[in-house]
Image: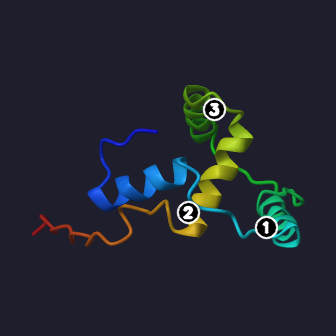
Amino acid sequence: MNKGKLSKEEKTLLDAVEAGEFESVLTEARKQELEAIANNTFKKDKRINIRISNRDLTAIQSRASEEGIPYQTFVSSIIHKYISGSLQDLTANKKIQPTRNTRG
């Protein structure tokens, strides 16, 4: 493990964990519960249909290709990140500048 960015306390704790000085208290029942929660988090059981411009679809497909994933997975990821708060609209809080009327 990369120890370069850890504080002294974190390094001491990591060394203790790696030396086997800690024992897990995770029960089998709790492990199964956590696994079920994790599986349900990524379960894709609904389908949607949307209409978007050809230009946007091409851009999405291009970005997905750069990421090395199918474009549908990329779109799903964007939606998930947005609703979970890890992807934000950078233009949402910008003030709109009023345009000046130059006609007399």
The x, y position of residue 90, in whole percent, is: 36, 61
Q: Quadrant of the C terminus?
A: bottom left
**Closer-to-camera residue (47/77):** 77
Is label 1 or label 3 in front?
A: 1
Q: Which residue is mark 2?
A: 82
Task: First in sequence, mark 2 or 3: give its number.
Answer: 3
Count numbered badges in the picture: 3
Q: On the rendered structure, is 89 left or right of 71?
A: left
Residue 84 is marked as none
Is label 2 or label 1 in front?
A: 1
Q: Residue at x 36, y 43 (%)?
A: 3
Relative to 71, residue 16 above or below: below
**Closer-to-camera residue (24/88):** 24
Is label 2 or label 3 in front?
A: 2
Q: On the rendered structure, is 18 left or right of 95?
A: right
**Is residue 52 in view from this perspective?**
no
Q: On the rendered structure, is 75 left or right of 36?
A: left
Q: On the rendered structure, is 19 left or right of 5?
A: right
Relative to 28, residue 7 above or below: above
Q: Residues within 10 Å of mark 1 (few under 14, many from 20)?
A: few
Q: Find residue 7 and report its image quarter.
A: bottom left
As helix, strand or loop, the secondary structure at mark 3 comes to helix
Q: Which residue is mark 1?
A: 34
Q: Residues within 10 Å of mark 2 (few under 14, many from 20)?
A: few
Q: Residue at x 57, y 59 (%)?
A: 81
Q: Which residue is mark 3?
A: 61
Q: Residues within 10 Å of mark 3 (few under 14, many from 20)?
A: some
Specify the amino acid type for callout 1.
Leu
Q: Residue at x 66, y 47 (%)?
A: 75
As helix, strand or loop, the secondary structure at mark 1 comes to helix
Task: First in sequence, mark 1 or 3: give its number.
Answer: 1
